[in-house]
Every structure is written in C-alpha cells, then in structure tokens.
Image (cartoon, rainbow, N blue to C red):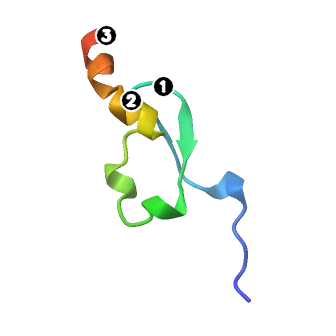
Amino acid sequence: MRPTCSKSDLPEKICVVCQRPFTWRKKWQDCWDEVKYCSERCRRRRSQAKNES
C-alpha cells in the first residue's frame, strides 16, 4: 500500500482573480504550473480582474 499524503502537504497557489489560496487537485496534476484560477467562476471573471488592476 502507498503511503498517504496529508492534505496540508499539498502545494498551494493564490488565485489571480479572487486572491484566495487554493490547493493542488488531481485533475491538475499534468498542468499545475499553468493553473491560475481556483474555479471556473474565476476563470470566467478573469477579464474583470484585469480591468480592476
């Protein structure tokens, strides 16, 4: 059996839209370096984040 990894050991990033921290997810394992948004909602709102900056 594989040793388990606790959730507190997962990498974390800050969402560029909402500025909240989010952690690594299995669906992002192949593209974690390219992930910028914590959710689909933030990804859709990315243009608003550029306008506010």
Kindly indicate whether the residue at mark 2 contacts the one at mark 1 (C-beta within 8 angstroms). yes
Asked if residue 4 is positioned above or below residue 27 in the image, the reply reads below
Q: Give me the disc on residue 19.
A: 1
Instruction: Give the CA distance from mark 1 to mark 2.
Output: 6 Å
Looking at the image, tell me whether mark 3 or mark 1 is earlier in sequence order. 1
Residues packed near mark 2 inside 10 Å, few (<14), some (14 to 19) or many (20 plus): some
Instruction: Judge by depth and name the residue closer to the eye, 14 or 25.
Output: 25
| Apparent side of residue 28 relative to residue 7 in the rendered image (left or right) | left
Q: Amino acid at mark 3?
A: Glu
Looking at the image, tell me whether mark 3 or mark 2 is earlier in sequence order. 2
Mark 3 secondary-structure assignment: helix
Q: Position of residue 15 (x, y in %)?
A: 45, 33
Residues packed near mark 3 inside 10 Å, few (<14), some (14 to 19) or many (20 plus): few
Q: Position of residue 41 (x, y in %)?
A: 44, 33
Residues packed near mark 1 inside 10 Å, few (<14), some (14 to 19) or many (20 plus): few
What residue is drawn where x is 74% and y is 89%? 1
Asked if residue 2 is positioned above or below residue 16 in the image, the reply reads below
Mark 1 secondary-structure assignment: loop
Q: Position of residue 51 (x, y in %)?
A: 25, 12
| Apparent side of residue 37 relative to residue 9 in the rendered image (left or right) | left
| Apparent side of residue 45 relative to residue 11 in the rendered image (left or right) | left
Q: Amino acid at mark 1?
A: Gln
- Reading the image, the residue beneath label 3 is 52
Residue farthest along the top direction in this orientation: 52
What residue is drawn where x is 70% and y is 52%? 8
Asked if residue 24 is positioned above or below residue 21 in the image, the reply reads below
Q: Amino acid at mark 2?
A: Val
Asked if residue 33 is positioned above or below residue 39 in the image, the reply reads below
- Reading the image, the residue beneath label 2 is 16
Kindly indicate whether the residue at mark 2 contacts the one at mark 3 (C-beta within 8 angstroms). no
